[in-house]
Image: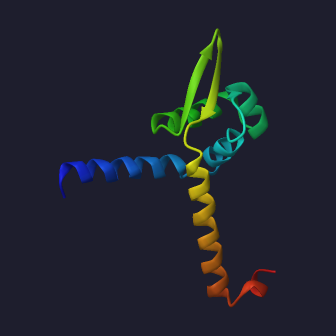
Amino acid sequence: MEDTLRRKYELRAELFKALAHPMRLHLLELLRDRTWCVCELAAAAGIDKSVASKHLSQLKAVGLIADERRGTLVEYRLEAPCVLEMAACAEAAAARSLRERLGGAEALA
């Protein structure tokens, strides 16, 4: 595989690693509609500020979120809302597949 393609797939793998935690997905959903400081995000997610900071740092490292310093306050914003659309699309496909394997929608009721 050529270097350019390898780097492209490595970047994608890093992106999916960053998405591979339920709390990081939750934080992305919270960031969908507005900017938040880490203390607000931590409170809304029900986690310690230090835990929220670690998750946010992983999301920032792959470019899904960005931050902006306002004095001593750091606000986070979603940079790639398309990732939430991708997650919803993949979730719908997985749900369809599960329904088919279980014998239809009534199996999930």
- Residue at position x 72%, y 39% in the image: 33
| Screen quadrant of the N terminus | bottom left
Q: Position of residue 83 (x, y in %)?
A: 56, 50
- Whether residue 8 is visible here, answered yes or no, is yes
Q: Position of residue 89 (x, y in %)?
A: 60, 64
Against 29, residue 39 (above or below) is above
Against 1, residue 18 (above or below) is above
- Residue at position x 65%, y 46% in the image: 23
| Screen quadrant of the C terminus | bottom right
Residue 48 shown left or right of residue 80 in the figure: right
Residue 33 shown left or right of residue 64 in the figure: right
Against 51, residue 82 (above or below) is below
Q: Which of the 4 image quadrants contains residue 54?
A: top right
Q: Residue furthest left?
A: 2
- Residue at position x 25%, y 53% in the image: 5
Q: Residue furthest top?
A: 71
**Which color scheme is applied?**
rainbow
Q: Nearer the viewer, residue 8 or 24?
A: 8
- Residue at position x 61%, y 52% in the image: 84
Q: Residue furthest bottom?
A: 103
Q: Position of residue 93 (x, y in %)?
A: 59, 72
Against 2, residue 18 (above or below) is above
Q: Nearer the viewer, residue 74 or 21?
A: 74
Q: How many marks?
A: 0
